[in-house]
Amino acid sequence: MSLLFIILISAIVIFRVGFDEQGVSASTSEYVKEQQEAVICANNIYQQEKENNAEFNSQCLGTCMDFAVDIVHVPRTDEDNKSENQCESYRNGKVGHFIELDKDGKIVRLV
C-alpha cells in the first residue's frame, strides 16, 4: 500500500511541476514563441503598409521569419485557395508557414 501511495504522490508532483495554478503550462514552447514573434512581425508589416495607404485585396505583404504574410478574403473564397494567389515565398518553399490576415489586419489563420 505504501509503494502505491508513493507512486501516486510522485505522479501528482511530476504532473504539477510544469503547470501553473490554472493548469496551464508554466513554460511556452519554442514553436509557440516563434508564432508569437511572427504574428507581431506580420502586424508590423500590415501597419507599415496601411500607413503607406495600401489597398488590401488579397496580396502577399512579405515574410516574417519562416512565415509568409498574406491578405485573404473573409469569408474565404476560391480565389484564396488558388496556388497562384499564395505568397511566392511559400509556394517555392523559402518559408514553411503562412499567416493569413483579413483586409483589416486581423488574423484569419496561421499554418
Image (tube, grey):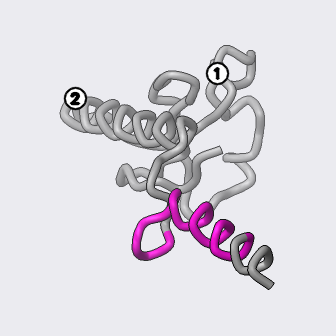
> Foreground: 109 or 85?
109
The C terminus lies in quadrant: top right
Against 73, residue 2 (above or below) is: below
> Foreground: 104 or 45?
45
Q: Residue 43's mark?
A: none
- In-image side of 31 versus 78 (left or right): left
Identify the residue at horizontal 67%, vertical 47% (top origin).
Answer: 80
- Crowd tier of the residue under label 2, counting other residues whose Cα lies within 10 Å: few below 14, some 14–19, many 20 or above: few
The verdict on residue 22 being magenta is yes
Of all residues, the one furthest to the front in this rendering is 2
The verdict on residue 98 being magenta is no
Quick check: marks 2 and 1 in contact, CB under 8 Å? no
The N terminus lies in quadrant: bottom right
What residue is disc 1 on?
95
Identify the residue at horizontal 45%, vertical 29% (top origin).
Answer: 61
Q: Position of residue 110 (x, y in %)?
A: 58, 47
> Magenta segment, which residues?
7-23
Tell us which disc is closer to us: 2 or 1.
1
Against 3, residue 17 (above or below) is: above
What residue is disc 2 on?
52
Residue 52, quarter of the rendered image:
top left
> Foreground: 70 or 41?
41
